[in-house]
Amino acid sequence: MLHITQLEMARQKTPARAGWLAMVAALLVTPAMFAQDAPAPTPAPAQPNGPRVTSTAKLAPSAGPKYDNRWELYGGLSFMNGQAGQNLPKRYNMGGAEGMVTYWLGDHLGIAGDYRWEGGTTPLSPTPYYNRVLVTQNIFSGGVQWRGPKNRYASIDYHALGGVSRGVFDSAIKGYPGGSPVTAAQIGLYPNSSTGWAAAGGSLDFNYKPKIAIRVQPEIIFEHFGTELREFFSISGGVVYKFGQR
């Protein structure tokens, strides 16, 4: 009887051992099955010969201009005020255009030539014939430029120019229908003449591309149409083009 009981107990333990063995086998086999089903990793493409370009390099800003150009051309629109007669009570405003060429001798010093055309209407002393009349100036000058602080974003230049301004004050008088009843001098205007002219100022150039910049240029103007030297204000804005390496 004892042998039969031990045999039955052994038979009862066998299924439990078999279950544990089956569980262990499943735990060992399952990772192997997932490893077989997982796709093989795609090999990285071979890098071509030469320097490797990264996204950081693509986004890096350009180095900007080197400021080693020989020539510089500037063209823009300008505003300037003035006085059209010795005793006229008010100044007048002119608008026009400016062109400047600079030849750079080195990193700082340059020789400049400048031309401007300015025109505007001036108020007059009380007269029954005219209210405002047109005045124009053609200005030729030359001088020097000095390049100051600079970086890849902007630069500051200083300049001094001297030359001649040709003023035309009697356009309305000559164009009066049937002939003007008064002369330019009788309504307080200067006679048509040329006089010494000078400008001192600077320019702020914002670099758009290595060879192109946007310029803002304020100045103090000196002229001598009357009996004394007078000072006025001018400002212009436009585009600078740089070319020719030193």
Image (cartoon, rainbow, N blue to C red):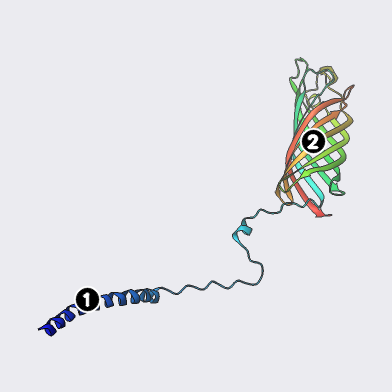
Q: Earlier in the sequence, mark 1 or mark 2?
A: 1
Identify which residue is drawn at 74% across, 51% down.
65
Q: Nearer the viewer, mark 1 or mark 2?
A: 1
Q: Quadrant location of the C terminus? A: bottom right
Residue 188 in percent (x, y) is at: 83, 18
Q: Is residue 12 left or right of residue 162?
A: left
- Determine crowd level at label 1: few under 14, some 14-19, many 20+ residues with C-alpha closer than 10 A: few
Q: Amino acid at mark 2?
A: Trp
- Front-lying residue, 43 or 189: 43
Q: Is residue 60 left or right of residue 36?
A: right
The residue that label 2 is drawn on is 117
Residue 22 in percent (x, y) is at: 27, 77
Does 194 appear above or below 2? above
The residues tagged by marks 1 and 2 sit, at their Cα atoms, a distance apart of 109 Å
Res 30 quadrant in image = bottom left
- Front-lying residue, 234 or 138: 234
Q: Is residue 161 left or right of residue 134?
A: right
- Front-lying residue, 124 or 110: 110
Q: Is residue 61 left or right of residue 45?
A: right
Tag 1 secondary structure: helix
Q: Amino acid at mark 1?
A: Ala
Q: Quadrant location of the N terminus? A: bottom left
Tag 2 secondary structure: strand
Residue 47 in percent (x, y) is at: 60, 71
Identify which residue is drawn at 87% across, 38% down.
141
Identify which residue is drawn at 85% across, 43% down.
112
Residue 8, numbered label: none
Res 8 quadrant in image = bottom left
Residue 16, numbered label: 1
- Determine crowd level at label 2: few under 14, some 14-19, many 20+ residues with C-alpha closer than 10 A: some
Contact flag, marks 1 and 2 (Cβ < 8 Å): no
Residue 205 in percent (x, y) is at: 74, 43
